[in-house]
Image (tube, helix red, strand yellow):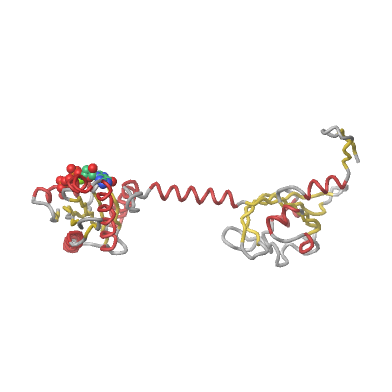
């Protein structure tokens, strides 16, 4: 036992065994002690909080006794052959692991576990102390990052893949087409006289028209084709497993589907048309050459009077 002056000036604070126990009991992190047989001899308040198991339910049992049953991120059991506490007891080396423990309510919780071997006065390992910390916050921030990455590739108005995504996707399709000699088609669509819709009905109705376009394109597409918003009132569709005839047929179907769709507004319902350019990727194409060709073909449709498809 040692004595140190109390910071509050209320007297001498005695550092007793009881003091250390209180300190451990009240740590926010979970702490438990395992002996060489991996029986749990000590379980603190933090461990109760994180796992839902009270001290009386746990102390005296083994860590694999239907209690914690650590698994890895694949859900595979660590207890029999890959228990971090057992390993640390064998080799005397502290270990750290990201594991999922079993909560009393049945669900799994991600925790960061640090295991340290404990020696007696002769230097023999008598057990390990395991300190674990709730890792959900870290995982939540990881899934937030994933969500942000997804959002970075999604157009916020129409929820379609945006130009950033489409660029990457088309590059990978071009790579595939060079390696395996599989071609694919690209259809470029541009709404006719869209500026007039904004000018006549307002920007909000223009936005509704873009959403309607996106919905019609998605619902008119085969599940393995990819529809995206290239920007403004321009959309593209990457069409796989096609020849010229199929590509022409698919582009013409989009044209008719859009022509027969309606933008529902508070007032008059609005009809739209699109001009389309459709091409097949060919050897030597780059992202730039492919998109420019489809865009140029779409422009020829504008010159030809709009609401039509040009193939090339
Ligand atoms: P064309 O038939 O030759 O394609 O004529 P257009 O009027 O469709 O073409 P233009 O390029 O002159 O106009 C495109 C318009 O699209 C102009 C722009 O304000 C509008 N626009 C672009 N993005 C959005 C958007 O997110 N929402 C709305 N409401 N309008 C947009
Ligand atoms: Mg345009
Ligand atoms: Mg336009």
Q: Position of residue 268 (x, y in %)?
A: 20, 56
Choose between 149 and 287: the one closer to the eye: 149
Q: Position of residue 50 (x, y in %)?
A: 68, 55
Q: Is residue 22 above or below residue 77?
A: above
Task: Say if residue 287 shows up in the picture.
Answer: no
Left/right of residue 267 with respect to residue 43 in the rendered view: left
Residue at the image point whose x is 66% and y is 60% from the top: 70
Quadrant hosting residue 214: bottom left
Left/right of residue 4 with respect to residue 150 in the rendered view: right
Residue at the image point whose x is 25% and y is 53% from the top: 209
Q: Residue furthest left?
A: 304
Q: Position of residue 76 (x, y in %)?
A: 60, 63
Left/right of residue 224 with respect to residue 258 in the rendered view: right
Q: Residue furthest right?
A: 1
Q: Residue furthest front?
A: 267
Q: Which quadrant does the N terminus fall into? A: top right
Q: Position of residue 148 (x, y in %)?
A: 44, 47
Choose between 196 and 167: the one closer to the eye: 196
Numbered marks: total: 0
Choose between 78 and 101: the one closer to the eye: 101
Left/right of residue 59 with respect to residue 132 in the rendered view: right
Task: Say if residue 279 shows up in the picture.
Answer: yes
């Amino acid at each position: 036992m040692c004595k140190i002056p109390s910071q509050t000036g209320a007297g001498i604070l005695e550092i007793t065994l009881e003091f250390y126990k209180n300190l451990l009991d009240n740590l926010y992190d979970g702490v438990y002690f395992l002996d060489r047989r991996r029986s749990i001899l000590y379980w603190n308040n933090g461990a109760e909080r994180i796992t839902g198991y009270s001290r009386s339910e746990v102390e005296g049992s083994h860590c694999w006794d239907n209690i914690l049953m650590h698994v890895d991120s694949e859900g595979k059991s660590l207890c029999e052959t890959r228990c971090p506490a057992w390993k640390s007891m064998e080799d005397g080396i502290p270990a750290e692991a990201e594991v999922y423990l079993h909560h009393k309510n049945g669900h799994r919780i991600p925790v960061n576990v640090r295991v340290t071997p404990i020696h007696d006065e002769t230097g023999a390992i008598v057990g390990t102390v395991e300190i674990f910390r709730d890792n959900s916050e870290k995982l939540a921030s990881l899934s937030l990052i994933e969500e942000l990455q997804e959002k970075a590739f999604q157009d916020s108005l129409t929820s379609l893949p945006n130009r950033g995504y489409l660029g990457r996707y088309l590059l990978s399709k071009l790579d595939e087409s060079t390696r395996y000699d599989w071609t694919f088609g690209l259809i470029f669509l541009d709404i006719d006289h869209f500026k007039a819709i904004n000018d006549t009905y307002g920007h909000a109705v223009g936005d509704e028209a873009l959403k309607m376009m996106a919905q019609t394109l998605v619902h008119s597409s085969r599940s393995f084709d990819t529809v995206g918003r290239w920007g403004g009132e321009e959309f593209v569709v990457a069409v796989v497993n096609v020849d010229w005839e199929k590509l022409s047929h698919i582009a013409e179907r989009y044209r008719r589907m859009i022509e027969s769709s309606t933008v529902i507004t508070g007032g008059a319902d609005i009809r739209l048309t699109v001009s389309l350019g459709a091409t097949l990727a060919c050897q030597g194409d780059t992202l730039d050459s492919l998109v420019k060709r489809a865009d140029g073909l779409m422009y020829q449709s504008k010159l030809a009077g709009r609401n039509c498809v040009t193939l090339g």
